[in-house]
Image (cartoon, rainbow, N blue to C red):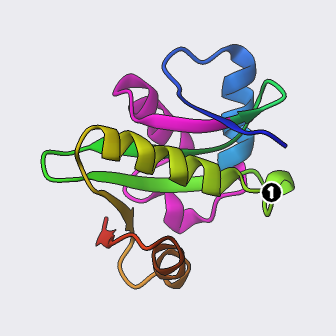
Amino acid sequence: MPVLVEIVSRPSAQDHTDLDKVYADAPDWLLTPYASVDALLADGIGSGKLIAGRSNDRLLGAALLTRGEDCWRLSHLCVRKLSRKRGVARRILDEARRLATQAGKPLHLAAPRDHLESQALAARSGLPLDNL
């Protein structure tokens, strides 16, 4: 399944539906510091930070890519439950790393302190982990 990764700046009605489905499966801790999925998506789209993986014209996963002075941070990475274990998160992570490298910045993962899944992802991908 080829997954194309893009910055979501002008989501269609279908994109909004897909993103709602992606984050409907997210655990509550993943939304921190946002009060809701709507707040996370509004900030991500409005600030140009929302990066998403698309296959067959549907968004299957998304994350926020924050471009900082010292480094870029990938956070709030989530893949729709039906699409997990198919390489969607890996494609988003790889594209974020490529974009950061192209800009001359290192990529870090950002997650809540002491979260084991995030620590494991950081270790597997060889990326530093920053606390949200």
Task: Reply above or below: 132 against 96.
Answer: below
On whether residue 26 falls in the magenta region, the answer is yes
Image mark count: 1
Task: Reply above or below: 5 against 48.
Answer: below
Quadrant of residue 85 in the image? Answer: bottom right
Magenta residue span: 24-53
- Please tell me which residue lies in front, 24 or 2: 2
Where does residue 81 sit, x and y in percent of width and height? 80, 57
Question: Considering the numbered disc 1 on the image, is that residue within a helix, a strand or a loop?
Answer: loop
Identify residue type, mark 1: Arg
Q: Which residue is mark 1?
A: 86
| Residue under the point 60% across and 18% down | 11
Task: Reply above or below: 49 against 78.
Answer: above
Where does residue 116 sit, x and y in percent of width and height? 51, 85
Question: How many residues crowd around disc 1 within 10 Å: few (fewer than 14), some, or many (20 or more)?
Answer: few
- Please tell me which residue lies in front, 119 or 16: 119
Where does residue 58 sit, x and y in percent of width and height? 78, 29
Q: Quadrant of the N terminus?
A: top right
| Residue under the point 23% across and 44% down | 104
Q: Quadrant of the C terminus?
A: bottom left
- Please tell me which residue lies in front, 51 or 91: 91
